[in-house]
Image (cartoon, rainbow, N blue to C red):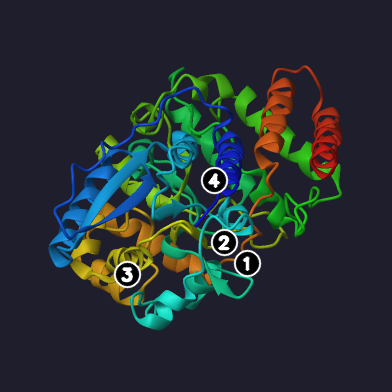
């Protein structure tokens, strides 16, 4: 039995994590109404996840299937947009109504483990309630911390550059292929800008490239392995990266931060409305953008760095974990098992949470898929063969570091400081944040 002090500790932890994940968002989380009284003899299993309306629709259909297979279990669902999800968990903890099954992110799973908010799953695996025998070794490892299994990977994804092939067909500009460089991307963007001579067309429709990826290509990392500082020692990496981004935005080849901030959702994105040819995404989002735009989008890895290292990596798109406060651990295990192993359930999910991490399900779905639905599967096959190990989860101060990065980057883009000054100021500010966290 958890004491009141324990509960307050949980609430405090989740509020801290919420602030990290949302930047103190003021929006109200969308909460599913509580299930009306479960039938006598049923056990109520509380399941929480984040996601858009499409994910909600698919997940609710899978829940219906699960309840048919296990009529003694009633699922009480809770969902919210990603930005509000962590606040929602804090609210549920404050009401002593913490979910049994929690959709978990790679960024935060270590903190939840350290603070004993989620439980090891090894005993549930040993009991046969949770079958992970078909789970990929890499995904099993990605959910294992301190030699214990805490998260079941629902799918895998990777960083990618999505592009609209129709724009290349219309303009006659050659499409890029895996192995292209930053220089190739810049040249292609210039050619597209010349061919589509319209003020509202921006070839690269997302507002930034990826500095962490760029560092990996230099054999460095954004954060040190112990999470107590930055992981690179040459400010030239950041100043060179900033110079490239400023040039792209100044030439109208990449969207500015102001343009991106004016877009409220994926349906408003430049690439969705054929106002851009490229957009950076995690690979499991390609189906959603294809549906929104009415165009079968394609995926490429990020540009290669001449003479550099491989920057791409396979990432757990998300996990399902079990709360350490649950009284329904066996039912929670059955739900996760159904979610990752049942073929009919995964036909409904269709890889929306990433390419399934179980081989049997992955092969079953791939046999059925056509067109844009296959794209992330084909892309992930490439990434599996062309990747390097993933960096450790980001430290607890990562939200503050990201806020600092954006603030300095915006000033640099506005010409208020040089890229060199921005790189130094970022390092100085990051060091202060790490020092404050350690004190």
When the figure is inspected, residue 235 is found, relative to residue 130, above or below; the finding is above
Q: Which residue is mark 4?
A: 7
Q: Nearer the viewer, residue 249 or 46?
A: 46
Q: Which residue is mark 2?
A: 313
Residue drawn at 65 percent across, 37 percent down: 399
Q: Secondary structure at mark 1?
A: loop
Residue drawn at 55 percent across, 40 percent down: 11
Labels 1, 4: front one: 4
Q: Which residue is mark 1?
A: 389
Q: Secondary structure at mark 2?
A: loop
Looking at marks 3 and 4 on the same chain, the residue that comes earlier in the sequence is marked by: 4
Residue drawn at 20 percent across, 61 percent down: 66
Looking at marks 4 and 2 on the same chain, the residue that comes earlier in the sequence is marked by: 4
Looking at marks 2 and 3 on the same chain, the residue that comes earlier in the sequence is marked by: 2
Per the model, the C-alpha gap separating discs 4 and 2 is: 37 Å
Q: Which residue is mark 3?
A: 337
Labels 4, 2: front one: 4
Label 2 Cα neighbours within 10 Å, binned few <14 / some 14-19 / many ≥20 = many
Horizontal side of 106 relative to 95 (left or right) equals right
Horizontal side of 170 relative to 87 (left or right) equals left
Quarter of the image for residue 331 reads bottom left
Label 1 Cα neighbours within 10 Å, binned few <14 / some 14-19 / many ≥20 = few
């Amino acid at each position: 039995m958890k004491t009141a002090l324990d509960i307050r500790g949980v609430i405090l932890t989740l509020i801290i994590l919420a602030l990290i994940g949302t930047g103190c968002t003021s929006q109200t989380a969308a909460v599913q109404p509580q299930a009306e009284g479960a039938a006598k003899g049923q056990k109520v299993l509380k399941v929480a996840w984040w996601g858009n309306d499409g994910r909600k629709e698919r997940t609710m259909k899978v829940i219906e299937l699960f309840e048919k297979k296990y009529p003694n279990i009633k699922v009480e669902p809770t969902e919210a947009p990603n930005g509000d999800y962590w606040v929602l968990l804090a609210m549920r903890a404050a009401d002593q109504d913490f979910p049994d099954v929690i959709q978990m992110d790679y960024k935060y799973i270590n903190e939840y483990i350290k603070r004993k908010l989620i439980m090891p799953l090894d005993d549930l695996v040993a009991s046969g309630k949770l079958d992970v025998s078909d789970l990929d070794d890499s995904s099993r490892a990605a959910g294992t911390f301190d030699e214990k299994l805490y998260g079941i990977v629902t799918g895998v994804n990777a960083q990618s550059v999505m592009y609209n092939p129709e724009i290349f067909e219309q303009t006659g500009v050659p499409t890029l292929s895996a192995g292209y460089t930053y220089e190739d991307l810049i040249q292609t963007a210039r050619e597209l800008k010349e061919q589509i001579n319209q003020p509202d067309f921006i070839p690269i429709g997302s507002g930034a490239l990826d500095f962490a990826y760029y560092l990996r290509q230099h054999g460095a990392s954004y954060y040190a392995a112990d999470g107590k500082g930055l992981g690179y020692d040459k400010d030239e990496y950041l100043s060179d990266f900033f110079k490239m981004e400023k040039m792209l935005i100044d030439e109208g080849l990449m969207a500015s931060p102001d343009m991106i901030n004016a877009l409220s959702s994926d349906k408003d994105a430049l690439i969705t409305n054929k106002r851009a040819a490229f957009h950076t995404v995690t690979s499991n989002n390609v189906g959603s953008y294809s549906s929104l735009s009415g165009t079968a989008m394609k995926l490429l890895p990020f540009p290669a760095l001449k003479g550099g290292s491989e920057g791409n990596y396979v990432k757990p798109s998300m996990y399902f974990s079990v709360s350490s406060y649950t009284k329904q651990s066996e039912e929670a295990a059955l739900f996760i098992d159904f979610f990752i192993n049942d073929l009919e359930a995964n036909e409904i999910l269709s890889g929306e949470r990433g390419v399934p991490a179980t081989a049997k399900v992955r092969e079953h779905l791939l046999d059925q898929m056509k067109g844009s639905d296959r794209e992330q599967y084909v892309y992930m096959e490439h990434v599996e063969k062309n990747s390097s190990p993933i960096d450790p989860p980001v430290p607890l101060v990562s939200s503050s570091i990201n806020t600092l990065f954006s603030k300095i980057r915006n000033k640099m883009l506005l010409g208020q400081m040089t890229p060199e000054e921005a790189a130094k100021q970022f390092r100085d500010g990051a060091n202060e944040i790490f020092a404050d966290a350690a004190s």
